[in-house]
Image (spheres, rainbow, N blue to C red):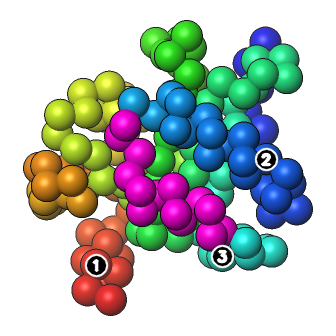
Amino acid sequence: MIRIVPIRPNLLRRVRPLLLNFSKRHGDRRITHRAIRWLTNLNKDPFPRGTWLAAALDGRRLIGFILFGNYGLDEAFIVVHPDYRKQTVGESLLEAALHSLDRVYTRVACDNIPSLKLCFKEGLVAFHLITGPTGKPTLCLGGGNWNRQEFTDHSLD
């Protein structure tokens, strides 16, 4: 049975190496170095406002996780084990994030069709096109009670 389990700051120290290794092994080279550094340096207790981290478990086996920093304005990514893709794991993780946070933002490269499908299936809206950190066209998306101005204001910081 697949469960979604929020990861609290007091547990992060113990599971961070597992999450970093999982990202490198199953992120299909789509998780940026910046995102990995962000997770590596996340040491706040409590987490900063809008930071949410959860794991998907099949029994005790890690099969995926999702992370939002500052509602996704600072960082956002999801990784699902290849054996569990197309089994609603990503959808469950994103639904749990939307339920726990009142809004989320993310950036997805236009060639990352699986992630775009996931975002659109869960009701996220594409509202801006940028050049991403890898030089690819990248959509900016928002979900829940998102606000374009909040995204724009943060981008100008």
Residue 126, x across and y down, in percent = 22, 49
Rendered residue at 82%/59% (across/down): 13
Q: Splitting the image into 4 quarters, where does residue 110 fall?
A: top left
Q: Residues within 10 Å of mark 3 (few under 14, many from 20)?
A: few
Disc 3 marks which residue?
Answer: 48
**Mark closest to the chain's N terminus, 3 or 2:** 2
In the rendered image, the vertical position of residue 47 relative to residue 154, given as above or below: above
Q: Please, is residue 150 above or below residue 83 in the view?
A: below
The part of the chain drawn in magenta is 29-42
From the image, give the main secondary structure of the stretch colored magenta: helix
Q: In this view, does 49 lie to the left or right of 18?
A: left
Q: Residue 72, relative to residue 111: is it above or below?
A: below
Q: Which of marks 1 and 3 is nearer the N terminus?
A: 3
Q: What element carries label 3?
A: loop
Q: Residue 15 carries which label?
A: 2
Whole-percent x, y for residue 140 in the image: 25, 56
| Quadrant containing the C terminus in the rendered view | bottom left
Q: For the residue marked with disc 2, what is the amino acid?
A: Val
